[in-house]
Image (cartoon, grey):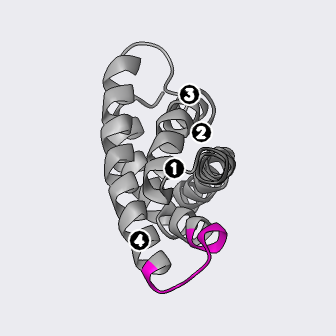
Amino acid sequence: MPDFHKTLSTVRNFLVFSGGSVVGAIIDYVVTLGAHGLLDMPPSLALSLSMVISASVVFLYHDRITFRTSGAGWLKRYVKFMMLAAIVLALRVVILELLIAAALPVFIAVAVAIVVVSVANFAASSMLVFMKGRQ
């Protein structure tokens, strides 16, 4: 039975994590397209700007809601999360540039680049950022 509870807990965390990912994805998508369309910023640079904003918001969400690790050690978790966000950004930028080079419209390429990395991001966040500080 303990394996069932562990599996159920992991599924619950993934669903709650997905909620944070949706918040981050909305920020990423809106800011990226806004900066690209309104400021004529290249898509990769616009995505980078959006991820600085969304990663901070999403960190707070995960730290307090998904993994309930808020409190002592938050700065160390934040730095790890931002380092992970930099890796996620690099993966997203590569995917975005490949999709744009393949003549996909920017609004579709941005959406695909954001969604594709989400599962890996959950796994990495769970194992590398939040689990040790979990209550």
Whether the residues at callouts 1 and 3 have beta carbons within 8 Å, the answer is no
Query: Which residue is nearer to you in this view: 68 or 76?
Result: 76
Q: Amino acid at mark 3?
A: Leu
Q: Residue at x 31, y 52 (%)?
A: 87
Q: Is 131 covered by the magenta stretch?
A: no
Q: Secondary structure at mark 2?
A: helix
Q: Which quadrant would residue 11 be assigned to in this image? A: bottom right
Which tag is nearer the camera, tag 4 or tag 2? Answer: 4
Q: Which residue in the structure is indicated by mark 1?
A: 41
Label 4 or label 1, whichever lies nearer to me, is: 1
Foreground disc of the pair 3, 2: 3
Q: Is residue 108 magenta?
A: yes
C-alpha separation, residue under disc 3 versus residue under disc 2: 9 Å
Chain part drawn in magenta: 101-109
Distance (Cα) linking label 4 and label 1: 14 Å
Q: In which quadrant of the rendered view does residue 121 lie? A: bottom left
**Looking at the picture, does residue 41 appear above or below residue 97?**
above
Distance, label 1 to label 3, CA atoms, is: 27 Å
The numbered mark, 4 or 1, whose residue comes first in the sequence reads 1
Q: Which residue is mark 4?
A: 97
Task: State which quadrant residue 62 falls in.
Answer: top right
Residue with the mark numbered 2 = 66
Tell me the residue at 36%/18% (across/down).
75
Above or below, 5 relative to 55? below
- The local crowd at label 4, few if under 14, some if 14 to 19, many if 20 or more residues have their Cα within 10 Å, is some
Label 3 belongs to which residue? 60
Residue at far front of view: 40
User: Residue 60: x and y, percent?
Assistant: 56, 27
